Image (spheres, rainbow, N blue to C red):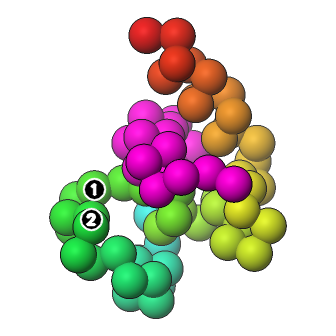
C-alpha cells in the first residue's frame, strides 16, 4: 500500500494526472493538500478500493522519482 507521501509525490510528477474534484471533497484532504496540489488520492485514474493506478503509471513514476 502506498503512503500519503508517495501518493503526493507521484501525483505531482505524473503525466497522466487528472484531478477529480469530487474525490477532493469526499476524502479528508483539505487539511493536507492545498487547492493546487496534486496527489493520486484525488486523481480520476486512482482506484481507491484497489489502491492502484488504473492506467499503470504509479510504479513507473515512483521508480523514476527514486532514480533522482
Residue drawn at x 57%, y 44% as measured from the top left: 16
The local secondary structure at tag 2 comes to: loop
Image quadrant for the C terminus? top left
Answer with left or right where residue 20 lies relative to residue 34: right
Front-lying residue, 5 or 15 = 5
Assess whether residue 21 is covered by the magenta stretch: no
Instruction: Residue 27: give x, y in percent of width and height.
Output: 45, 83
Q: Say which quadrant the N terminus sits in.
A: bottom right
Magenta stretch?
1-18
Quadrant in the picture for residue 56: top right
Q: Which residue is mark 1?
A: 37
Question: In the visual, does 26 lie left or right of 54?
Answer: left
Task: Determine whether 14 is above or below 61 in the image.
Answer: below
* Side of 34 where 48 appears, left or right: right
Q: Which image quadrant is residue 37 in?
A: bottom left
Residue indicated by mark 2: 33
Please indicate whether residue 63 sits to the left or right of residue 20 in the image: right
Q: Is residue 35 visible?
A: yes
| Dot 1: element | loop
- The Cα atoms of the two marked residues, 1 and 2, are separated by 6 Å
Look at the image and say whether residue 17 sits in the magenta stretch: yes
Where residue 12 is drawn, which disc sits there? Answer: none
> In the image, what residue occupies the spot 42% across and 48% down?
5
Residue lying furthest top in this view? 68
Q: Position of residue 61 (x, y in %)?
A: 58, 30
Amino acid at each position: 500500500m502506498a503512503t500519503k507521501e508517495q501518493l503526493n509525490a507521484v501525483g505531482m510528477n505524473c503525466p497522466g494526472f487528472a484531478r477529480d474534484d469530487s474525490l477532493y471533497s469526499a476524502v479528508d484532504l483539505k487539511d493536507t493538500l492545498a487547492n493546487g496540489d496534486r496527489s493520486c488520492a484525488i486523481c480520476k485514474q486512482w482506484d481507491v478500493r484497489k489502491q492502484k493506478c488504473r492506467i499503470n503509471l504509479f510504479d513507473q513514476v515512483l521508480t523514476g522519482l527514486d532514480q533522482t
